[in-house]
Amino acid sequence: MRLLTWDLPRAESGNTEAMERAKVTAYLLDWHEKGPVKKRPAVVICPGGGYHRLSPREGEPVAMEYLAMGYHVFVLWYTVAPGRFPQSLWELASLVAHIRDHSEEWSIDPQKVVVSGFSAGGHLAGSLGVFWNREFVYGPLGRKAEEIRPDGMILCYPVISSGKYCHAGSFENLLGEEAKEEEKRRLVSLEEQAGPHTPRTFLWHTATDETVPVQNSLLFADALIKSGVNVEFHLFPSGGHGLSLAREDTSKGQESLVEPGCQCWIRLAGEWMKRI
């Protein structure tokens, strides 16, 4: 395995005074082999944290699982508040395009670049899925829409809706003062933006999530189905928010973050990846 890290260039959006530069950690397989090397799918992970912080539990531990399945992995430590929409979206879009630029060098299948996110990171990943063909995303990056398009999305207990079932803090951190504007809130409510252009999607959530209600995933799944998008949705009967791998090693010692019934999600997501 080869480990790479770098900072992303920053497009300007909102208050940049106290913003740290976004970072990427890349975990690449087969880099040392001689002769033909298998081209593998890539997964880009966006940890959660309500757009005000980033959770390490949803970064490297998850990356190690995808690596074990034979996938290249990139963890995006994106901009959070006081950075505002669409700063983090530009960063994710830029990373997806960068991965395709280096697909030969890194032995990546450029038609199998998947974005994945947890909670607010799920909103970020989902945002690229619904906005990749919008000029306000690819234009400022000097890219074409198809260069930033994800080939699939893996969304884990994602923030989706700014409506009745919203996680208010995520949208306040994402939009700042613009969170008071109905038009802006509807723009970032992803069930409102989903359509036939949205890539195939793997979703999972728990019915007892009290932080980001399961209706977020239900609304998104319904919008995708109505648009004819291929969607796989797993609804687990119990478990709180922020489970990561739902195992003891990602629980921070909190019993509420260990949920044996949810631990299969990563295996299911890996199998779903094979069908892209």
Image (tube, rainbow, N blue to C red):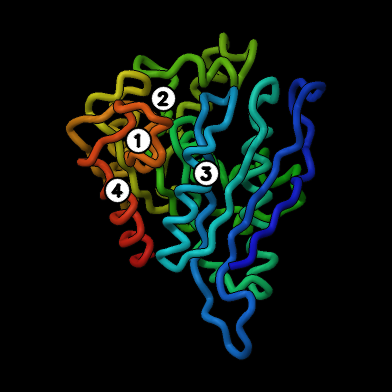
At horizontal 66% and vertical 48% (from top left) the residue drawn is 24
Q: CA distance from mark 1 to mark 2?
A: 8 Å
Secondary structure under tag 2 reads loop
Q: Nearer the viewer, mark 2 or mark 3?
A: 3
Horizontal side of 171 relative to 68 (left or right) equals right
Q: Relative to residue 183, is residue 136 depicted above or below?
A: below
Q: Are marks 1 and 2 in contact (CB under 8 Å)?
A: yes
| Residue under label 1 | 220
Q: Nearer the viewer, mark 2 or mark 4?
A: 4
Screen quadrant of the C terminus:
bottom left
| First in sequence: mark 1 vs mark 2 | 2
Q: CA distance from mark 4 to mark 1?
A: 18 Å
Q: Quadrant of residue 134?
A: top right
Q: CA distance from mark 3 to mark 4?
A: 16 Å
Secondary structure under tag 4 reads helix
Horizontal side of 242 relative to 208 (left or right) equals right
Q: Are marks 4 and 1 in contact (CB under 8 Å)?
A: no
| Residue under label 3 | 59
Q: Nearer the viewer, mark 3 or mark 4?
A: 3
Q: Quadrant of residue 191?
A: top left
Asked whether 199 or 53 is in front, the reply is: 53
Can you give x and y, in whole percent of width and height, for residue 74 in the image? 58, 54
Can you give x and y, in whole percent of width and height, for residue 144 in the image? 68, 55
Q: Are marks 3 and 4 in contact (CB under 8 Å)?
A: no
| First in sequence: mark 3 vs mark 4 | 3
Q: CA distance from mark 2 to mark 4?
A: 22 Å
| Residue under label 2 | 161
| Residue under label 4 | 265
Residue type, numbered disc 3: Gly
